[in-house]
Image (cartoon, rainbow, N blue to C red):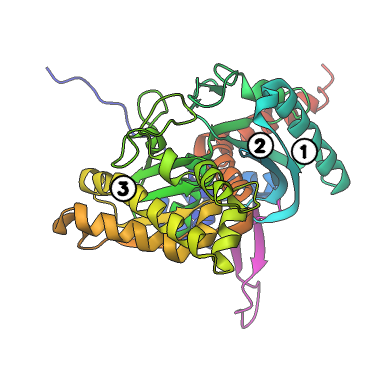
């Protein structure tokens, strides 16, 4: 005997919003055709979305008489998201609109060795100050996106124990923001957030690797249109894979032979300092390359070869269409990508590289906060999240209505 199957539920207001946000529907009639909803049901959902500020109505301008046609559009200015991008030596905080466009940005120096309490509290305070100075309405903040250089349990918002950041394991990242902001907080690894942002910038690409080459090295994986974090959120931790030529080199994780010992910013700073160059961070390395320093160019190309050795294995395993190189070291792009290409095309199979493209990140200076904002928006503007906001609003309106006299 067959079990009765539940009838599929009708598209919700959140589902309707996604069609408007993605540009799939611009009128009520298009919404009705795509969803199968009646005219009355479409009107109800559109009115709910208009009340949230997520959707706006605009005259089409094509009327020849009578009531002008109206088009529906996603209103990116109908609210804000706050973004935090925590790096090895600096943090960026920003106020963004609902399309992840940065409206106000501030950068502050940090030292992760100071520990999570000091660093995260300073970042949260800076973000609160920036929000006040920008004149933003706290009631219009839809969420906060925060990215950190380490693995994250996205279910709990707690950090997992990283190999190179003592004291940053099992830290409740979310709890450093919730006392100041009454809004959802989304936390993830910085490279995952950047991979997601690059994926949104390449709508025709379903399989990509984002590689952040900066103080450390990590990769974000998008496969079949989905961000892949792995069982413990440690997918993409490529910086500590063993590579040729690094067998006797000690990594900052305490092991030997890691990719980072040849290709990470900290290792290049150390190597160039030993050759008499005056520099303090990865950006200084990239600047030396841009000014034509031959030793810096040689070392960065060599770093690219080591990175390409690891990426060749990833190419064979995942068969991405696109590899995006980002991070501070990508500012020395030409020698870096030359080394990466050399190793990948020597080591990966012809089939896996047949359609492979390698490009520099287009996110540039605001990459981290834009990625954090995109990450937050993927969560707080998802259909279920939008439906929950509407349900809370409708419940508050019902409670605020005066009772009829008996």
* Rendered position, 90 above or below 74: above
* Rendered position, 376 above or below 366: above
Residue range in magenta is: 55-78
> Does the image show residue 83?
no
CA–CA distance between discs 3 and 1? 36 Å
User: Which image quarter is the N terminus in?
Assistant: top left
| Residue 109 image-quadrant placement | top right
Horizontal and vertical percent position of residue 28: 53, 58
Q: Nearer the viewer, residue 400 or 141?
A: 141
> Does the image show residue 102?
yes
Who comes first in sequence, dot 3 or dot 1?
Answer: 1
Determine the residue positioned at 52% across, 30% down: 150
Do callouts 2 and 1 mark residues in contact (Cβ within 8 Å)? yes
CA–CA distance between discs 2 and 1? 10 Å
105 displayed left or right of 7: right
Who comes first in sequence, dot 2 or dot 3?
Answer: 2
Does residue 64 belong to the magenta stretch? Answer: yes
262 displayed left or right of 166: left
Q: Which mark is residue 311?
A: 3
Q: Which mark is residue 144?
A: 2
């Amino acid at each position: 005997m067959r079990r009765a199957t539940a009838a599929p539920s009708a598209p919700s207001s959140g589902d309707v919003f996604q069609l408007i946000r993605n540009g799939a529907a611009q009128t009520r009639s298009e919404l009705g055709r795509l969803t199968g909803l009646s005219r009355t049901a479409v009107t109800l959902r559109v009115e709910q979305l208009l009340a949230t500020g997520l959707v706006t109505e605009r005259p089409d301008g094509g009327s020849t008489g009578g009531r002008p046609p109206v088009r529906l559009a996603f209103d990116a200015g109908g609210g804000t998201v706050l973004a935090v991008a925590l790096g090895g030596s600096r943090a960026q905080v920003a106020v963004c609109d609902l399309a992840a466009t940065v409206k106000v940005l501030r950068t502050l120096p940090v030292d992760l060795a100071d520990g999570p309490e000091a660093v995260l509290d300073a970042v949260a305070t800076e973000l609160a100050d920036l929000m006040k100075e920008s004149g933003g309405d706290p009631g219009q903040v839809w969420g906060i996106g925060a990215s950190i250089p380490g693995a994250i349990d996205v279910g709990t918002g707690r950090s997992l124990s990283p190999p190179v950041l003592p004291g940053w394991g099992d830290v409740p990242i979310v709890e450093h923001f919730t006392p100041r902001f009454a809004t959802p907080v989304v936390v993830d690894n910085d490279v995952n957030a950047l991979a997601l942002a690059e994926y949104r910038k390449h709508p025709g690409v379903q399989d990509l690797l984002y590689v952040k080459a900066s103080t450390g090295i990590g990769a974000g994986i998008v496969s079949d249109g989905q961000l892949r974090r792995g069982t413990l959120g440690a997918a993409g931790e490529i910086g500590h894979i063993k590579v040729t030529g690094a067998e006797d080199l000690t990594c900052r994780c305490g092991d030997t032979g890691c990719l980072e010992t040849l290709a990470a910013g900290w290792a290049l700073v150390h190597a160039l300092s030993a050759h008499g160059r005056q520099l303090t961070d990865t950006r200084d390395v990239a600047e030396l390359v841009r000014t034509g320093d031959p030793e810096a160019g040689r070392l960065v190309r060599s770093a690219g070869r080591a990175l390409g050795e690891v990426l060749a294995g990833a190419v064979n395993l995942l068969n991405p269409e696109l590899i995006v190189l980002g991070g501070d070291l990508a500012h020395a792009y030409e020698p870096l990508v030359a080394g990466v290409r050399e190793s990948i095309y020597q080591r990966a199979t012809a089939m896996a590289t047949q359609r492979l493209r390698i490009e520099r990140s287009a996110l540039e200076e605001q990459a981290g906060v834009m990625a954090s904002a995109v990450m937050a928006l993927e969560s707080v503007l998802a259909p279920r999240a939008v439906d929950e906001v509407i349900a809370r609003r409708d419940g508050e309106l019902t409670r605020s209505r005066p009772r009829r006299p008996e």
